[in-house]
Image (spheres, helix red, strand yellow):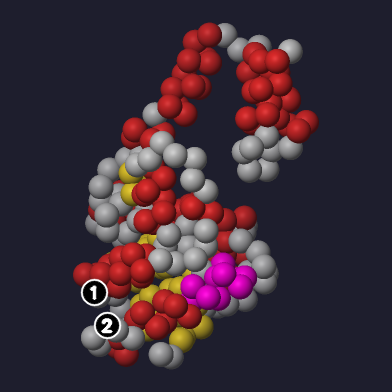
Amino acid sequence: MQILDNLAKELKKLPGIGSKSARRIAFFLIQQDEEYLKHFGSLFSNLRKNLHTCSQCGNISEQDPCNICEDPIRDKNILCVVENVESLSAFEHAGIYNGLYHVLNSEKLSANLDSDSESDSFDDDGLTEQDINFFVSHVKALKPEEIIIATNPKIEGDMNYYTLLESLKSIKGHNKIKITRLASGLPVGGLIAFADKVTLHTALQSRMKVEL
């Protein structure tokens, strides 16, 4: 059945979906009524229309600024720097952090949301000059007492970590900002987005102060 094969082929492109899972999902979908499929399809078609990047932190949101930046009960003295929205989501679902965030690579995400292209630039972990400038301007505007650098414990994450440290030196009064980095709990080569609540909590509580 060509239609089913094409659907399974597209589903297989999703993260974590293998051939067998893709076919099971495809068979499930063809058994649903038309109303369900229309609703299901509308969720996909409206993604680009309704989602935007927050102009303050780079998060994905239906509003700008995002609901986290606008939340009055958030601790605005702490800024947690993450590499992508998946990492931010992991912290939020764990419920262990109540400060603000800064999402790196937001320029790439914004370009993909505003474009119909199938560019894979969002998968590029490297930071651009725009990413760095966006980060520095956020820190200057927020004036946090502490910056938690929560990059992934792998080579790319380490490179981003040192790049961020260098960029912070350009900020007047940077020596008054407490800079910490996630410590034990996260395995080397792992991803924050896939860490469980206990692991994230341990890493967050064991963060270390960094001297510029």
Q: Label 1, secondary structure: give it.
A: helix
Q: Which residues are magenta?
A: 152-161
Q: Is residue 4 above or below residue 116?
A: above
Q: Residue at x 25, y 87 (%)?
A: 173
Residue farthest to the top?
34
Q: Residue at x 33, y 65 (%)?
A: 130
Q: Quadrant of the N terminus?
A: top right
**Which dot marks residue 140?**
1
Mark 1 or mark 2: which comes first in sequence?
A: 1
Q: Residue at x 69, y 38 (%)?
A: 17
Q: Position of residue 31 (x, y in %)?
A: 66, 12
| Res 28 quadrant in image | top right
Q: Amino acid at mark 2?
A: Ile
Disc 1 + disc 2, Cβ < 8 Å: yes
Instruction: Name the one closer to the observer, 186 or 190.
Output: 190
Q: CA distance from mark 1 to mark 2?
A: 7 Å
Q: Is residue 128 left or right of residue 160?
A: left
| Res 196 quadrant in image | bottom right
Q: Residue at x 41, y 50 (%)?
A: 109
Q: Disc 2 designates what residue?
A: 171
**Which dot marks residue 81?**
none
